């Protein structure tokens, strides 16, 4: 069973509280990030959420991310690596006038680079 299947009832409840459908890992990740931000900056949590619930959401989110990493499943990260490779190849073959390219990284970006470098992770 997937985490989404195991915790369907909780995901449905958290979806009602947050206004998100929470039918995929990306939406849970967005919710976890938003709630972590609110806690970090001492902002009011949405009705229904408390510290214990937020900790559980973060734990589930981390499990999904680590599992995806170990299964080599990072669609956003893969897109980042392919885009980076394209820029490198254009530069190597003098097919671009760009002097630099700036990427803004996030979890999937960093984890995809770690995977490409064959760096294992056990926790997030």
Image (tube, rainbow, N blue to C red):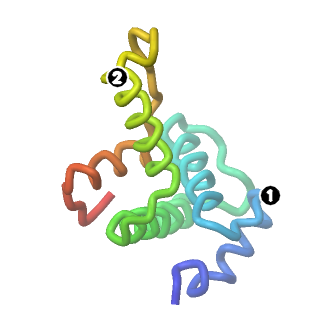
Q: Is residue 42 above or below residue 28?
A: above
Q: CB atoms at circles 1 and 2 under 8 Å apart? A: no
Mark in front: 1 vs 2: 2
| Residue at the extreme bottom | 1
Horizontal side of residue 82 vs 31, given as left or right: left
> Callout 1: 10 Å neighbours few (<14), some, many (20+)?
few
Q: Which mark is residue 19?
A: 1
Label count reads 2
Q: Tell which circle, 1 or 2, labels the residue nearer the N-terminal end.
A: 1
Label 2: state its secondary structure: loop
For mark 2, does the 10 Å Cα neighbourhood hold few (<14), some (14 to 19), or many (20 or more) residues?
A: few
Residue position marked by numbered label 2 in the rendering: 93
The residue that appears at 66% across and 43% down in the rendered structure is: 44
Front residue (pair 55, 87)? 87
- Quarter of the image with the C terminus is bottom left
Task: Kindly indicate the quadrant of the structure image that contains residue 10.
Answer: bottom right
Give the residue drawn at x 45%, y 11%. Answer: 98
Q: Quadrant of residue 22?
A: bottom right
Per the model, the C-alpha gap separating discs 1 and 2 is 48 Å
Q: How far from the left and from the top, in percent, is residue 117?
A: 21, 49
- Vertically, is 13 above or below 50? below
Q: Position of residue 16 (x, y in %)?
A: 79, 66
Which residue is found at the position 42% from the left and 67% from the top? 68
């Amino acid at each position: 069973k997937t985490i989404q299947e195991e915790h369907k009832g909780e995901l449905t409840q958290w979806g009602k509280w947050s206004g998100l459908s929470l039918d995929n890992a990306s939406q849970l990740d967005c919710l976890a990030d938003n709630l972590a931000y609110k806690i970090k900056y001492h902002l009011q949590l949405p009705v229904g959420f408390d510290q214990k619930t937020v900790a559980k959401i973060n734990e589930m989110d981390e499990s999904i991310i680590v599992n995806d990493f170990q299964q080599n499943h990072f669609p956003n990260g893969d897109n980042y690596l392919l885009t980076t490779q394209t820029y490198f190849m254009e530069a190597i073959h003098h097919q671009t006038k760009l002097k630099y390219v700036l990427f803004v990284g996030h979890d999937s970006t960093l984890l995809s680079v770690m995977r490409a470098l064959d760096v294992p992770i056990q926790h997030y």
